[in-house]
Image: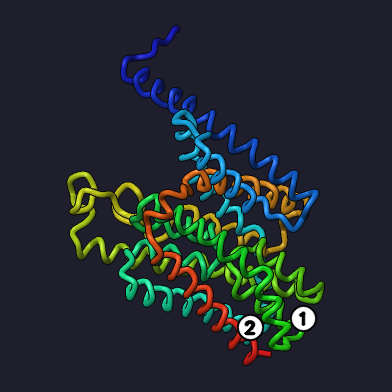
Amino acid sequence: MSTTVGPQQSATSAPRSSGVARALPGLALGAAVSAAALGLNRWVPSLSPLLVAIVVGATLANTGRIGAGLEPGLAVASRRLLRLGVALLGLQLALGDVLRLGWGVIAVVVAVVALGIAGGMVVGRLLGLSRSQTLLIAGGFSICGAAAAAAVDGVIESEDDELVTSVALVVLFGTAMIPLLPLAAGWIGLAPAQAGMWAGASIHEVAQVVAASGVIGSGALAVGVVVKLGRVLMLAPVLALIGLAERRRAARSGAGTAGDGSAADGSTGGGRGGRPPLVPLFVVGFVALMALRTTGVVPSGVLSLAKWGETALLTIAMFALGTGVRVASLRRVGPRPFVLAGATTVWVAVVALGGILLAT
């Protein structure tokens, strides 16, 4: 018996196929840049593919080489692929590795994230910045850089240029800490292990921690990375708390009405389509994969493949976010986000240093 495609089915499938076709050019360019950045990282391990991708994206955007035809694919990469990459990041975390740091260092990690976000929120309020911009910067700088800022963006209502600004500031200030923190650690007289802990507890991106710890010495590298992964572990509970706060704010302001699920001002909620989620799906995936890794049942080959996939996805996403970094836009936002980024960087570093000295 033959079947025919009805008008409604045809109308539904056509937009989907056309949407995929529109996204392909941007995704293909992102994949090409990701492959090049990953290849460069194999030759020069100190160069993070994520940071390379952001710089390439910003360079292309500011030289007028990002056309309108690339934008649909870049939008998919900056949201869907990024969240998938964040979820896969859970496979890189085993609770046992973090617990072996000892309760003193674990307390330092919790304090850095909690006090870092709280201090950033206070400074952002004093500067008159929007709550969303402040949360993106404070969360990103306190947890794990660009990926954390993008994850926070998944549970709050923010403007696209606010996320782009936060990512650009992560690159700027995190990169500046690579030479500055080892110099400061030597001036203070920290032992290599202490300096590695300080790097892991205060620098924004995992790759930046690796670079700074490598400058300090091999004794700092392993401990610095594990401390940094302890901060990454805080991503899930922090996002859950932010999601809960957003739902309460939405309820108080009358968001999520029975009509179309939109907010009172006509904008959608932090979940980009209604009431902000308490725990976004990609965070559930992050926690589930972290629990799976902790069991020890995942073969090393699968972990290596997942690590490559996570890095590739995040590199494509960072390239897409980088294309939104426009010099004119950064000039337009003014100096206040830069002041907040600098203040949060210094505050997190001070809290981390004080905690490490007390714990060790």
- Nearest to the observer: residue 73 or residue 127: 127
Quarter of the figure that contains the C terminus: bottom right
Q: Is residue 38 left or right of residue 265?
A: right
Query: Does 165 appear above or below 226?
Result: above
- Residue that badge 1 annotates: 192
Quadrant of residue 337 within the rendered picture? bottom left
Q: Residue at x 28, y 49 (%)?
A: 268
Q: Mark 2 Cα within 10 Å, few/some/many (few <14, many 20+)?
A: many
- Residue that badge 2 annotates: 105
Q: CA distance from mark 1 to mark 2?
A: 15 Å
Q: Residue at x 73, y 88 (%)?
A: 189
Q: At label 1, which amino acid type do we have?
A: Pro
**Extreme residue in the bottom direction:** 358
Q: Residue at x 47, y 67 (%)?
A: 139
Residue 18's x, y, as percent? 44, 23
Q: Is residue 292 left or right of residue 214?
A: left
- Nearest to the observer: residue 97 or residue 36: 36
Image color mode: rainbow
- Nearest to the observer: residue 238 or residue 302: 238
* Element type where label 1 sits in the image: helix
Q: Residue at x 73, y 75 (%)?
A: 223
